[in-house]
Amino acid sequence: MGAGHTERMRVQWVDTDASGRIHYTAALRYFEVAEHALMRQVFFDTPERAFSLPRVHVEADYEAMLGYPDEFECTVRVVALGRSSVTYGYEIVRMDGVRAIRGKIVAVAVGADGRPMPLPERYRERLAPGAV
């Protein structure tokens, strides 16, 4: 596996539905918070990039309840690097040690013309196994 980061968070009231459990979309926001922290950690000294990384595949498996005001850790890890893609694996674990959610997001490097492009070598090196 490649670069990774763990972010500690708490379920906010706004993340829940009438049952007191998180709305399923909250997990995707938690994934993104952890991913952004990873990217800040890995690319803190890199100037603006000339490409974007839109999502092309998202999945999540909900294994245990997560509700207000649970604390949890969301871990993100780069699990695969393709020619133009990066695959992130996620795991949300409650503070009692129970895994609540696991997921995966695939993003593809896209140039200014909107077409897929190879991941620049500098990014590939920093996301690869042993990077962080």
Image (cartoon, grey):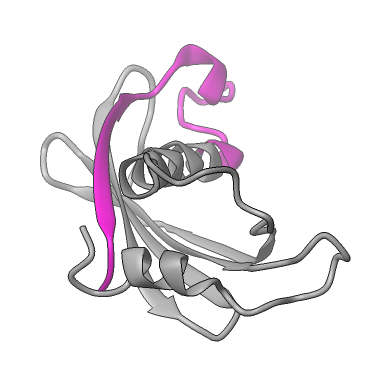
**What span is in magenta?**
1-26
Q: Give the x, y percent position of residue 112.
A: 82, 59
**Image-based side of 41 in relation to 95, left or right:** right
Q: How many numbered marks have been drawn onto this rendered protein structure?
A: 0
**Image-based side of 12 in relation to 10, left or right:** right
Is 99 or 53 nearer to us in this picture?
Answer: 53
**Image-based side of 122 in relation to 76, left or right:** right
Q: Is residue 121 above or below residue 123?
A: below
Q: Give the x, y percent position of residue 46.
A: 45, 46
Q: Is residue 23 magenta?
A: yes
Quadrant for the N terminus in the image: bottom left
Is 69 or 49 nearer to us in this picture?
Answer: 49
- Residue positioned 18% across, 48% down in the render: 98
- Residue positioned 88% across, 65% down in the render: 113
Would you identify the image quadrant in which residue 10 lies? top left
Q: Is residue 3 above or below residue 66?
A: below
Quadrant for the C terminus in the image: bottom left
- Residue positioned 38% across, 27% down in the render: 67
Would you identify the image quadrant in which residue 78 lies? bottom left
Q: Give the x, y percent position of residue 62.
A: 43, 54
Q: Is residue 17 magenta?
A: yes
Q: Give the x, y percent position of residue 6.
A: 24, 43
- Give the farthest residue toward the top: 13
- Give the farthest residue toward the left: 96
- Residue positioned 53% across, 36% down in the render: 26
Is 26 or 51 nearer to us in this picture?
Answer: 51
Is 73 or 83 nearer to us in this picture?
Answer: 83
